[in-house]
Image (spheres, rainbow, N blue to C red):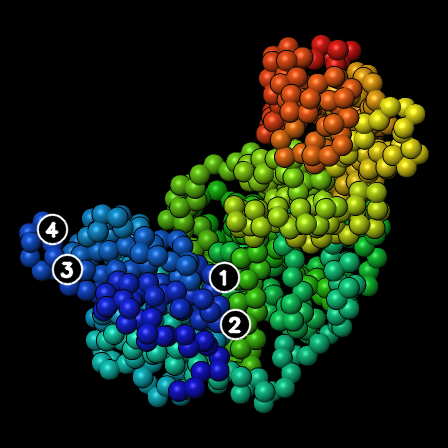
Amino acid sequence: MKFAHVNFLWDEKEASKLNGDEVALLVYRSNLLGSDLRITNYGGGNTSCKTAGIDPLTGGKTEVMWVKGSGGDLGTMTKSGLAALYVDRLRNLKNIYRGIEHEDEMVQLFDHCIFDLNSKAPSIDTPLHGFLPFNHIDHMHPDAVIAIAASKDGKRITRELFGGSVGWIEWQRPGFDLALKLRHYVDENPGIRGMILASHGLFTWGDTSYECYINTLEVIEQCAGYIDEKVAAKRVVFGGAKVNSLSQEERLNKAARLAPILRGYCSSHARMVGHFTDEGKVLEFVDSKDLDRLAKMGTSCPDHFLRTKISPLVLNLKADDNIDDIEAVKEKVAPQFETYRKMYSEYYNECKHPDSPAMRDPNPVVILYPGIGMFTFAKDKQTARVAAEFYVNAINVMRGAEAISEYVALPRQEAFNIEYWLLEEAKLARRSKPKALSGRVALVTGSAGGIGKAIAKKFTDESACVVICDNDKERLEGAKVEFSKKYGKDVFIAGTLDVTNGSDIHKLFDEASLAFGGVDIVVNCAGLSISKPLEEHTEKDWDLEYDVMVKGQFLVTQKGVEVMRRQNFGGDILNIVSKNALVSGPNNAAYGSAKAAQLHLSRLNAAELGKDKIRVNVVNPDAVITDSKIWSGAWAEGRAKAYGVRVEELPAFYAKRTLLNEIINPDDIANACFAFVSGLLDKSTGNVLNVDGGVAAAFVR
Ligand SMILES: [Zn+2]
């Protein structure tokens, strides 16, 4: 078969290097399958193989099943992501199974069937693989198959398409009972090559890892090809366009301004991070005539709506509505959020059981804006991005189902039973406590090196998303490489920024709003120093110092506050000033006075912004030499000359004149910044925290 809708990636040369090691081949096959989102969604689906093993307790032969464990993603799974269980023990559990109302108690018993002590926790799907009498099994969530699985005539279409060689099982929540049903179906229908699970996904199998892989690909290819033909014959999808998308530039412009407002509403229970996409598939859906009808119905595959909530919020805004009038937009949007929250709590109250967990955050995860695109909000960037990916999966499913028949969503009660499944709740309860800056977004100027980079790293270590920026492109490239190696691509963006340039600042805050939904910590760290005696100071020197440090702090703060006011949940401005704002030394006229201006500007801002719950605080470092551009140039020579010491003696010189006799490092400043935003000092604004080893002359009076 020729594959046009899935990637055929099996490389026999690579596979043969694994010397027939079935577990290694399972990992290989899983990685190939998981690398193609058309085959399965992120984190979705599982794979298994059954092999002969030696029972360490008896020394005798035993059959062992290796299956993807709970959590993780097939695309990147390694052996440590697998659970290995005794097949006979697992199958014997049916002898003590008490019936469907008790099926959840079986999950704990899977642990008693574990063969390999390094196993990952077995997932809920374990018995589905265990009871099927095949050596190699794939369970995938392909959009094309779910489209058939979630359409009104899915059963008939499956029969026609595969002539009975692929079975059909009505919707049932995955678990022990479904496992028994799958086995029963296979026993009744010998010779079938796979099964479609209504509203859910696909099971396929084979005698070898390769045969299983090919079987999976062929079934998906056939479904996808069939849908493509139907879409082509119909010509219009989703009933055709109802609104026209704006140009990409206008879309991004609007989205950047609206995102912080939406983030504010979505954060009414817990601080959320956003993601925006206007990819073609999303626009086709949000612009369509069928949007209102289909969006309301909710998604189908349980994996989809666990990530996206029961249904999205479709904004009742026009693409050409003016987004710049914040109050007018809020007046329109606020009641829409109220309606959504009400819908969600009604859904909860109508469907809840006596032992259901308490209602979770009633805010939407997915927000659709016709003509503009899709916003998603979640506790961190990766979750928000994956929620968007899942909704695109859901769009694909609805698109396919509507083309071949009619889309059918999962019944609300079934959706609820999965969303508020006690086992799911237990999983949530096991999650580690979020770090102090989880859900927060920080923009740090001058963060390609020195103090700025240390601050950005500290905040990222504490789970914030960060915007790193600098006017030095080369240095910024280096920081980008370092950040993506250490933290991955989701949690930071980087942009060149000249803090004296209003349009640069504007652009970067827009990028931050598109990437994360907004900004709630701004750190003004960009700076430079020129040390010269009065008579040598040029007007240019003077202007540069004041432009970067005073005007720069002013402009960046101004824009940051604009974004914070859109979010409407307060924020933090941190200004990295200097001991020199408070004490005087020789050869320092422009730098020292600009630092004093920064300090007073901070106090003025604090006085003005308290009503918005925006705190403005100052960290006063002194003589931070490590990794600082300031100290690599003429400044160090200038200071050394001014103090009558040699350049290499400067760190010790600075340390010695402090009360604590300490050398100050960038991390010390980063820790001070963290102290201000960690939540412990929430009632402090207009403050100055010195990190200078103790310089009595620089005490705040
Ligand atoms: Zn599944």
Side (left or right) of 345 relative to 192: right
Question: Which residue lies at the image location 68% right of the left edge and 79% below the top edge?
Answer: 240
559 on left or right of 632: right
Residue 421, position as x, y percentages in the image: 41, 51
Q: Which element carries disc 1, helix, strand or loop?
A: helix
Which disc, if any, is residue 397?
2
Query: How far apart, in angstroms, are the residues tagged by discs 2 and 3?
Result: 40 Å
Return the disc, 2 or 1, that comes first in the chain's sequence.
1
Are there few (<14), some (14-19), or many (20+) residues within 10 Å of tag 1? Answer: many
Q: Amino acid at mark 1?
A: His
Q: Let me know if residue 598 appears in the view.
A: no
Q: Nearer the viewer, mark 2 or mark 3?
A: 3
Of the two numbered discs 2 and 3 on the same chain, state the one appearing first in sequence.
3
> Which residue is label 3 attached to?
53
- Kindly state the secondary structure of the residue where label 3 is placed: strand
Q: Which residue is at a point 31% across and 50% down the rendered structure image?
A: 120
Instruction: Please rate how many residues cluster around mark 4, counting C-alpha atoms within 10 Å: few if below 14, some from 14 to 19, many from 20.
Output: few
Position above or below: 305 against 354: below
Badge 1 or badge 3: first in the primary sequence: 3
Judge whether residue 553 can be spotted in this image.
yes
Q: Nearer the viewer, mark 1 or mark 3?
A: 3
Q: Which residue is mark 1?
A: 304
Task: Tell me if label 2 and label 1 are in contact, CB under 8 Å.
Answer: yes
